[in-house]
C-alpha cells in the first residue's frame, strides 16, 4: 500500500454514495454536539475540516455556529460532492479545496487556523511513518498558538487484539449499508462497504494504535494530547468503536 492509494479508492461513484453510508441525521445524533462544544471550549473561530469527505462536519458547523469554516480533502471526487452538499444545504463555507495535509501550511499559511478537524478515520490512509509525521508537522504549523488538532480513528487496538465489532452508533449510521473488515493484519485493515443493491466498495487503512498516534503527535510538536472514546472520557478501550484525540499547540 502507498500514501496516495485512497485517491483511487474514492471513485466518483463511491463518493456520490458516501452520504448513504454516513447517515447525516444519525451521525449528528450520535455526536451530540461534541465538536461544537469542543471548539467553543478552546475559543476557536477559524476552523478547517481537513478530511471533509462529502462535507458533513464543515456544512454542519457552518449552519449551526458562527465559525469561519474551510473544507479540504485529498480526494477531488469527495470535494466535488462537498461542493454539491454545501450548495444544497445553503452552507456558507470560506473555502472548499483539494489540499494534501502535507501542504496545509503552504496553501493557507502558517498559524492560519484555531482548529483543524481530521475526522472519520481518514488519517489511517497514510501507510508510512514519515508521511504521517510530515502531515502532523504541517498541521502543527497551520495552527495558531493555543490551537487544537482533533483527530479520530477507529479503535484499532481492539480490532487487532480482539477482532472487529461495532455498535454503528456514532459513525456510518446509514440505513442498510454494512461496513466491516474483510482483512485484518498489523500492516493493513481492508474494509468492505456493502449497499442494499449488493454493490461493494473497499478501503484499505493502516491500523493506528492509540499510543503510537499520541507519540507521533508529540514528535510533531504538540505538547498535550487528550483522548476520548466515542466522545466520552474516561472510557474502556475494549468498549469503544472510535478514538478522538485532541492535541494542543503550545502558546
Image (tube, rainbow, N blue to C red):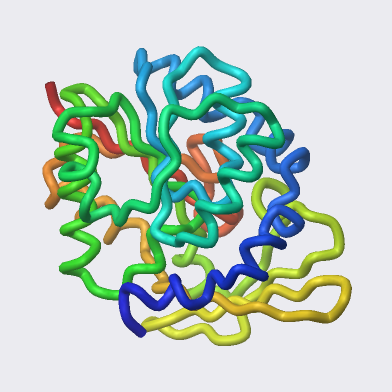
Quadrant containing the C terminus in the rendered view: top left
* Residue at left offset 44%, top offset 50%: 51
User: Would residue 235 be seen by someone viewing this image from the given angle?
Assistant: yes
Where residue 97 appears, as percent x and y from the top left, is 40, 46
Q: Is residue 22 above or below residue 129?
A: above
Q: Is residue 246 above or below residue 21?
A: above
Classify residue 16 as left or right of residue 11: right
Where residue 111 appears, as percent x and y from the top left, is 17, 29
* Residue at left offset 34%, top offset 74%: 4
Where residue 214 appears, as percent x and y from the top left, is 27, 51
Classify residue 105 as left or right of residue 127: left
User: Would residue 227 be seen by someone viewing this image from the given angle?
Assistant: no
* Residue at left offset 14%, top offset 27%: 250
* Residue at left offset 36%, top offset 85%: 1
Q: Quadrant of residue 199?
A: bottom right
Where residue 58 appears, as percent x and y from the top left, is 53, 35
The residue lying toward the viewer, choosing from 193 and 69, is 69
Q: Quadrant of residue 188?
A: bottom left
Classify residue 120 as left or right of residue 247: right
Q: Is residue 70 above or below residue 45?
A: below
Amino acid at each position: 500500500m502507498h500514501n496516495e492509494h485512497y485517491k483511487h479508492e474514492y471513485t466518483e461513484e463511491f463518493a456520490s454514495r458516501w452520504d448513504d453510508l454516513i447517515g447525516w441525521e444519525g451521525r449528528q445524533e450520535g455526536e451530540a454536539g461534541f465538536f461544537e462544544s469542543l471548539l467553543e471550549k478552546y475559543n476557536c473561530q477559524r476552523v478547517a475540516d481537513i478530511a471533509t469527505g462529502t462535507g458533513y462536519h464543515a456544512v454542519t458547523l457552518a449552519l449551526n455556529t458562527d465559525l469561519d469554516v474551510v473544507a479540504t480533502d485529498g480526494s477531488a471526487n469527495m470535494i466535488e460532492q462537498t461542493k454539491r452538499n454545501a450548495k444544497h444545504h445553503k452552507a456558507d463555507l470560506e473555502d472548499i479545496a483539494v489540499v494534501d495535509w502535507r501542504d496545509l501550511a503552504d496553501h493557507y499559511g502558517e498559524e492560519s487556523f484555531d482548529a483543524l478537524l481530521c475526522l472519520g478515520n481518514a488519517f489511517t490512509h497514510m501507510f508510512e511513518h514519515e508521511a504521517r509525521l510530515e502531515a502532523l508537522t504541517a498541521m502543527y504549523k497551520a495552527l495558531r498558538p493555543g490551537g487544537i488538532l482533533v483527530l479520530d480513528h477507529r479503535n484499532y487496538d481492539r480490532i487487532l487484539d480482539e477482532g472487529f465489532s461495532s455498535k454503528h452508533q456514532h459513525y456510518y449510521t446509514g440505513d442498510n449499508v454494512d461496513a466491516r473488515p474483510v482483512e485484518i493484519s498489523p500492516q493493513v485493515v481492508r474494509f468492505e462497504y456493502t449497499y442494499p443493491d449488493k454493490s461493494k466498495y473497499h478501503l484499505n487503512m493502516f491500523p493506528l494504535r492509540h499510543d503510537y498516534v499520541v507519540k507521533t503527535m508529540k514528535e510533531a510538536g504538540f505538547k498535550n494530547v487528550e483522548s476520548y472514546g466515542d466522545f466520552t472520557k474516561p472510557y474502556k478501550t475494549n468498549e469503544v468503536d472510535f478514538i478522538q484525540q485532541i492535541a494542543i499547540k503550545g502558546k
